[in-house]
Image (spheres, helix red, strand yellow):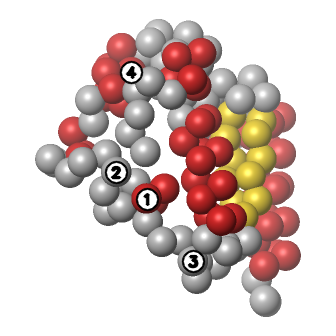
Amino acid sequence: MQENNLPSRQTNAERDLILGNNNPFMFNAVAQPAYSKGYKAKDPRLSPIYADLSGLPPMLIQTGGYELFLDENLALAKKAAADGTDVTITIYPGMSHDFALLMPDLQDSVDSFVEIRDFVKRHMHK
């Protein structure tokens, strides 16, 4: 979902330290993505929110509360669930895009990796 007018794109523009407007290169890359190569934002090849998500394995979505894509992540979780996919979404308040990659400096990063490990263990033999 490539929607620059979603609420999290506005409210988190100042708070997302990775993709927010404090990082003009990334902020502009998000606003006008080069990867779209002429595809429309609602093309399922570009955005899974518009695809058929039925039949997928269990899905874990981790997002930061300050994430520029927070609304897209919530929409993905809702769409996956509506399509019958077992989906878990966790919002880490106060975290920006890719917060987990900051490990081990942030406790939320460590916690996210523990959640990933536990999710994989829980679904490994289903």
Query: Could you classify mark 4 by the number of other residues whose Cα lies within 10 Å: few (under 14), some (14-19), or many (20 or more)?
Result: some
**Quick one: SS at disc 4?**
helix
What's the residue at 43%, 45% (across, down)? 1
Q: Residue 32: give x, y in percent of width and height.
A: 26, 29
Give the alpha-carbon distance from disc 3 to disc 2, as whole Å: 18 Å
Q: In which quadrant of the rendered image does the C terminus lie?
A: bottom right
Alpha carbons under labels 1 and 4: distance apart:
24 Å
The three-letter amino acid code for the residue at tag 2 is: Lys
Q: Is residue 55 above or below residue 66?
A: below
Residue topped by disc 3: 54
- Whether residue 17 can be seen here: no
Q: Which residue is drawn at the image coordinates 67% and 74% (left, top)?
A: 84
Determine the image quadrant of residue 7.
Answer: top right
Do labels 1 and 4 touch, CB within 8 Å?
A: no
Of marks 2 and 4, the one in the foreground:
2
Q: In the rendered structure, which amino acid carries the disc numbered 4?
A: Phe
Give the labeled residue for mark 1. 50
Residue 64 seen anywhere in this rendered image of the structure:
yes
Depth-wise, is mark 1 or mark 4 nearer the camera? 1
Q: Label 2, on which residue?
A: 42
Amino acid marked by disc 3: Ser
Judged left or right of residue 60, residue 18 is: left
Q: Earlier in the sequence, mark 1 or mark 4?
A: 4
Task: Looking at the image, tell me whether mark 3 or mark 4 is earlier in sequence order.
Answer: 4
C-alpha separation, residue under disc 2 versus residue under disc 1 = 6 Å
Tag 1: residue type?
Answer: Tyr
Horizontal and vertical percent for residue 125?
A: 79, 89
Q: Which residue is mark 4?
A: 27
Disc 3 to disc 4, how far (Cα)?
32 Å
Q: Earlier in the sequence, mark 2 or mark 4?
A: 4
In front of the other: 92 or 31: 31
Q: For the residues labelled 2 and 1, say whether their Cβ atoms are less than 8 Å apart.
A: yes
